[in-house]
Amino acid sequence: MSDAVTQNINKPIFSYEKGTGGAEIRLHSPLSMPNATGYLWNKKMMFQMTCRGYANALHMQPEPAKYAYGQSFEAKTFMQPEHHYYSGHPGRFFYIKLSNSDIFSLPYEPTRQTLDKFAFIQGQDTLRWEIEHANIQFTLRVTLADDVALEDWRLDIVNKSNNEIHLDIYPCFTIGYASWMNQSARFVPELNGILGEYITPYQKAKDYPKIKQSMDKTLFIADSPIESFDTSTNRFLGEGHMHCPDGVKHSSLFNSTALYETPIAVLQHKIRLEPRQQKKLSWLFGPCQSETHAKTLSNRLQQHITAKPSYLKQGISIQTPNADLNHMINSWLPRQLSYHIESNRLTTDPQTRNFLQDHLSSIWLNPTLAKRNLLLALSQQGKNGAMPDGILLHEGAELKYINQVPHSDHNVWLFPFVELYLSETNDFSILETTVGFGDSDHESTVSEHLELACDYLWAQRDHRGLSLIQQGDWCDPMNMVGIQGRGVSFWLTFASAYAFGIWSKILKTTQDTIRAAKWHDYQQILNDTCNTLGWDGDWYARGITDDDEHFGISRDQEGQIFLNPQAWAMLSEAPTPEQADKMVNAIESKLRTPFGYCMLAPAYTHMDERIGRVTQKFPGTAENGSVYNHAASFYAYALYQQAKINNTNKHNDIAFEVLFSMLATDSDCLKRGQLPNFIPNYYRGAYHQLPEAAGRSSQLFNTGTCAWYYRSVIEGLFGIKQSKGSLTVKPNLPSSWTNASISKKIFGANVRINIKRGAEASVSSDSNNLQIEGSHISGFEAKKTYLISVIINE
């Protein structure tokens, strides 16, 4: 066992701390969780970096692009789960050479030398490393500029010894193989740094206007004198490798210029420090359009203006007996929510389902943005009622990748969005706002758009009354169930029923009783059809293929049970209490693992051509049987809704377990390999098939989980529901909890709700201006502060 592990053996793997910029998470070793990452973003870019120094970054121009690449030509694709890091992977490295020629590197890669002290800290708007070695203290940090795609790096060095020391500092930032057409890099004295240049490869003349506008340059500039430099990867490495390059072993770098070679950006700074003396160095790294643009950006070297995302104005604050949940809800989930609504997952055509679910978050954090984005989505609806496969965010955007494959579920997501928006804002006037269509100049009210969306869902059914799946529903790789136009989805049928139920309740609230009754009846028809054709004895089937074969049923050897149909059956109010109990028992028996609830089980191990490419994914990853947290968040929310529908708390402990199992904690983080600074899209499943890999995090923070998790905590765990100016509080605390509290804005008022167990249930307030009838509270005035006390039965 190395010293780096030994020195931390008695410490926790990570710790929650309070820094000057807010909540932080500190990892104490580079070896315990080598793939643990932190992330930053602004409205122009996303930056993710491992604790050891490997990095991924994307910026928008307006399509996503890189400014640092690997050593071989890379295909353009979306962010990948379980990203593979290797010795030549792009990174941000700092070689340190002591006067005795000993060499090590910050933060840890690529030399991998044992360090005396190490800490990696994810802050709210910074990533930071605190490292000590050879009696020298290093504080390395990176932030992002506030309004441009630019990394701002700072290194503080303190000589803790009683002797004068001499250091060579070699910041080494990968530029990589960016183009087979044209790539180079050179030192520019006027910039005091390096400019990498390339031309994005293209072959069609019609693509030239776009290419012409690209930021096909990468700058790396310093604020301190530069002794020497290298821009050629081959010259810098020589006969060595990244762990020990020839350039660092020599007294100076080779001042090489990359001429149609793979470029790199390496600088050499010579530092002399008296005893206890401190030295600060700064660098900027990022894309630019020209040398003139680079000079403009260089003015930011001394400014250090960092991005302050809106998550700092969080939606809720909680105090519960569970510290891990408190940290996630109060500090880290609002951050992830804000990332999604500000970045749109670094795409210009987000899938409609992703766009509407991600922007559920904006209803809590930025209701004005939520309204604008709902109207944007509806403006691209077809006159026939169909929502598009993706939402185009600017005039030149086009549908790409998965959005060129027709999916059947996009209309569904309008209704949870509108329900939550009306609940939180009480802005029913939006229903009369007019908006156009994607294929017509005609304008209709939002209410009429939503009616058309329901009509379309109702029309897209087969002769049995089940929803056609096309080439996928929420599970987009389930692409062969209905490729011939006959396959159906029980999940989508339940989801459509859920949508109809929401719309019926909204219509009832607006006194449109005739249409409300119609859609309530249609909801019941769909539920009855699923109960007749989809119930398999202990759970619901997933679907019926083009060849009229049920799947997701007890006789299947693989893919025997799916989580989503069970969750959405509960949401649509389809099962009887007895059926719900059977479903919960089956899920506990077949889908629950120590790391959460799997999306399906057993995972598929070979292609099933009746179902599609989901069965080709590696067992236990992504949609093929992973602990897919988006699906698990649906299930948690559904369990809490069952408690409300059936007036029972018997599933409260399970609902909380579903939520808690999505969090990395000190007891299981080594297996998950992730810090609790976000909820990933999945953890490895297939627990009984491949136990050695089960629990491993995807490290991917793009996920629809976030808003549903947040909503489950607010409406489910704490039982807070707003409607037409009134508040209902019916908490669903785990049986082991005796108390909890939540602070939240309610209709513009600042409200704190304290919950505790007692002999007799009651609701009271410190204000005589509030009207309380049972669990219903009204009379809130904006900007005022209220304290509400809720006692629930012991």
Image (cartoon, grey):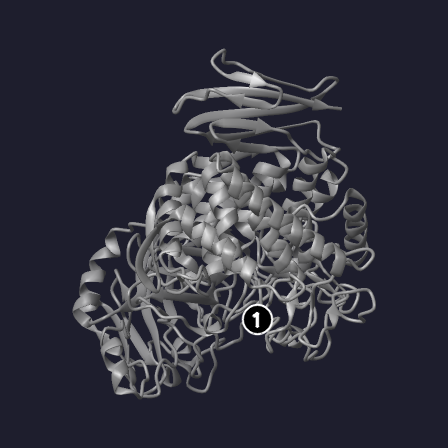
Q: Position of residue 778 (x, y in %)?
A: 50, 21
Residue 321 location, quadrant = top right
665 and 370: which is toward the camera: 370
**Where, quadrant-wise, is the C terminus in this rendering?**
top right
User: From the viewer's perspective, is 215 left or right of 30?
Assistant: left
In the rendered image, the vertical position of residue 597 relative to residue 501, given as above or below: below
332 and 226: which is toward the camera: 332
Q: Position of residue 173 (x, y in %)?
A: 38, 70
User: From the viewer's perspective, is 573 left or right of 65?
Assistant: right
Q: Count the numbered circles shown.
A: 1
In the rendered image, the vertical position of residue 257 relative to residue 18, given as above or below: below
Estimate how packed mark 1 is, as few (under 14), some (14 to 19) or many (20 or more) residues with alpha carbons within 10 Å. many
On the question of residue 174 being in view, the answer is: yes
| Residue at the image point whose x is 75% and y is 67% from the top | 692
- The residue wearing badge 1 is 470
Q: Secondary structure at mark 1?
A: loop
| Residue at the image point whose x is 32% and y is 65% from the top | 285
In the rendered image, the vertical position of residue 651 relative to residue 390, given as above or below: above
On the question of residue 709 being in view, the answer is: no
Q: Position of residue 279 (x, y in %)?
A: 33, 53
737 and 546: which is toward the camera: 546
